[in-house]
């Protein structure tokens, strides 16, 4: 009892969870507030509007106004909310059976005509590149429809994704386009007509192997995995040694409700010390996230990340082919933070990714309240 | 009061508020159970996380019946936990714990489905609150692993008092101040 304890104080953080082996569930009744319907967003025709032909903030505001004008007072009150970072933080990788704190109506609350405006808004805010931006979003929604068909488990389905306007879409002031559901979080923040933040941006998908749903092939995150594998496999032995992170990662660190989880000290291979080939491959991996945003926003963000590349670190744990359970890759720069983690399937056999893109200064548009 | 304890006390109080915002989901749980002049402690650990740092416990194939842990396996678990668990009072006197039992249970999480849980029940020597917990089992290897700490008064719902995670920057064990909520 006389032994003395030397205490060194670590860090206290908010909670997270870790997955274990897939489990097949039986059919079950829908959760309160959710409809478990396949809305097949890819088949919805875009509305004919006078909002202009090309993506822009003005067009986004115009589309938002048109959506709002056709809603019941109750639905409008759910969609149009005051701007607060507290609500912006209510995103998650979980489906509704694991997280029901999201704000805004679900896609299942809208009529087909209203859904057409929702689709147009999402296409305007995101890029139209194949397997990125809106296309990636569509495929993640298709994955939930696939899971509902495969498992019958209440909570899965494209109808259960939420959309909200935090703050009024307008040419002045601050607002955020909030969209999220199982394995998806989009957080585009605008101030005075400019996009000032596109993060936190969460992507995940199950199944990870290509699947057919809603009349198309889906593999929304294959290109992220391939980009990371290309970068890691291009490393020399010395570079790989420096890039190897100690320990095991069974999930990402800076996930939902983990806004303070980014370590203060960068780890891994400093890209200033890497070959030009590795540098360009890491930039290509970063682009698979930044290109989820429409072209105007993406160009400015990529320019910033490219300027900071020398002080950006590449780290990994597990295999360099990034195709096994507990494989983990991290890009940690002065601004950019990207994690990609492969973990066991929850609902179907096989591994599936969780991934987050954060910006250390521009998450939630740089706002704190 | 020694400076190191003061620091732990201060940070524990500062961080307490943050912990209450946590969205509790499965990881490790440590539930302190005051019992007279001592304290019991129940630790639950998802088996598949434990097996990343520990040789496999018995036959834990997912579709088989739950195994009963042998005496030697319980001893191994005890040895491992004692290397990663330290509880002390504010005078920095160590509280001695011993393992009373260990078993594997089925558990279920809405998001993750079914998984297996190692449940270890420990009991302490005399313990006077507040206590300082230092714990890094699994977290020393699995960097994203977290441990939720609860205090369970007799007959009451366990109260969450904090969440611990290894600190990649400090590479140090994590610690937390635990106060008896009776006061």
Image (spheres, coloured by chain):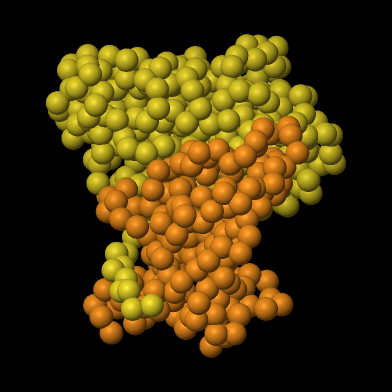
Chain colours: A yellow, B orange
Q: Is residue A52 visible?
A: no
Which residue is nearer to you in this view: A351 or B118? B118
Where's residue B175, x and y in %? 38, 64
Res A20 quadrant in image = top right
Front residue of this view, candidates A363 and B180: B180
Q: Residue furthest front?
A: B72
| Residue A60, percent from left and from top | 50, 34
The structure residue drawn at horizontal position 29% and vertical position 30%, both measured from the top left corner, is A244
* Quarter assignment of residue A294: top left
Residue drawn 35% across the image and 47% down it:
A262
Q: Residue furthest bottom?
A: B183
- Along the viewing direction, whichever of B27 and B122 lies nearer the viewer: B122
Q: Provide residue A199's location: percent of width, then percent of height.
A: 42, 40
Q: Is residue A323 left or right of residue A243?
A: right
Residue A42 at x, y percent in the picture: 65, 19
Say whether residue B148 is left or right of residue A41. Answer: left
The image shows residue B160, relative to residue A102, as above or below, that is below
Q: Is residue A251 rendered to the left or right of residue A267?
A: right
In the picture, the quarter occupied by the N terminus of chain B is bottom left
Residue at position x 67%, y 32% in the image: B61
């Amino acid at each position: 009892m006389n032994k003395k304890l030397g205490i060194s104080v670590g860090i206290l953080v908010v909670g997270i969870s870790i997955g274990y082996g897939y489990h097949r569930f039986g059919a079950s009744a829908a959760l309160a507030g959710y409809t478990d319907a396949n809305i097949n967003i890819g088949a919805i025709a875009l509305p004919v509007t006078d909002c202009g032909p090309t993506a822009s903030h003005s067009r986004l505001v115009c589309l938002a106004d048109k959506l709002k004008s056709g809603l019941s007072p109750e639905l409008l009150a759910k969609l149009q909310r005051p701007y607060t970072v507290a609500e912006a933080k209510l995103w998650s990788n979980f489906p509704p059976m694991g997280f029901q704190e999201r704000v805004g109506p679900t896609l299942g609350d809208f009529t087909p005509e209203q859904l057409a405006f929702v689709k147009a808004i999402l296409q305007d805010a995101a890029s139209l590149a194949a397997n990125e931006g809106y296309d990636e979003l569509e495929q993640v929604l298709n994955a939930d429809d696939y899971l509902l068909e495969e498992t019958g488990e209440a909570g899965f389905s494209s109808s259960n994704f939420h959309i909200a306007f935090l703050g009024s879409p307008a040419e002045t002031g601050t607002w955020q386009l909030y969209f999220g559901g199982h394995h998806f979080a989009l957080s585009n923040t605008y101030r005075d007509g400019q996009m000032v933040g596109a993060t936190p941006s969460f992507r995940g998908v199950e199944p990870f192997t290509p699947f057919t749903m809603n009349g198309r092939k889906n593999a929304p995150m294959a290109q992220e995995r391939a980009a990371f594998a290309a970068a890691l496999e291009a490393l020399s032995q010395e570079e790989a040694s420096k890039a190897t992170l100690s320990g095991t990662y069974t999930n990402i660190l800076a996930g939902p409700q983990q806004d303070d989880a980014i370590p203060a000290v960068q780890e891994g291979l400093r890209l200033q010390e890497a070959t030009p080939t590795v540098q360009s491959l890491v930039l290509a991996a970063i682009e698979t996230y930044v290109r989820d945003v429409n072209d105007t926003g993406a160009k400015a963000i990529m320019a910033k990340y490219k300027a900071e590349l020398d002080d950006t670190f590449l780290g990994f744990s597990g295999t360099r082919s990034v195709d096994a359970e507990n494989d983990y890759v991290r890009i940690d720069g002065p601004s950019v933070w990207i994690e990609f983690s492969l973990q066991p399937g929850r609902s179907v056999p096989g591994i599936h990714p969780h991934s987050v893109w954060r910006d250390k200064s521009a998450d939630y548009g740089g706002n704190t309240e | 009061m020694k400076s190191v304890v003061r620091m732990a006390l201060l940070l524990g109080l500062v961080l307490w508020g943050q912990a209450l915002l946590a969205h509790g989901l499965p990881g490790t749980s440590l539930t302190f159970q005051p019992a007279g002049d001592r304290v019991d402690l129940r630790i639950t650990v998802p088996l598949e996380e434990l097996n990343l740092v520990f040789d496999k416990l018995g036959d834990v194939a997912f579709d088989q019946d739950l195994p009963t842990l042998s005496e030697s396996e319980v001893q191994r678990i005890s040895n491992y936990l004692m290397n990663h668990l330290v509880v002390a009072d504010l005078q920095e006197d160590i509280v001695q714990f011993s393992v009373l039992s260990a078993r594997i249970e089925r558990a279920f999480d809405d998001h993750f489905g079914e998984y297996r849980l190692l449940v270890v029940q420990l009991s302490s020597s005399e313990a006077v609150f507040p206590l300082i917990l230092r714990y890094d089992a699994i977290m020393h290897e699995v960097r994203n692993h977290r441990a939720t700490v609860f205090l369970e008064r007799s007959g009451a719902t366990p109260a969450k008092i904090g969440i611990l995670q290894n600190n990649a920057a400090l590479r140090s064990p994590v610690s937390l101040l635990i106060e008896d909520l009776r006061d």
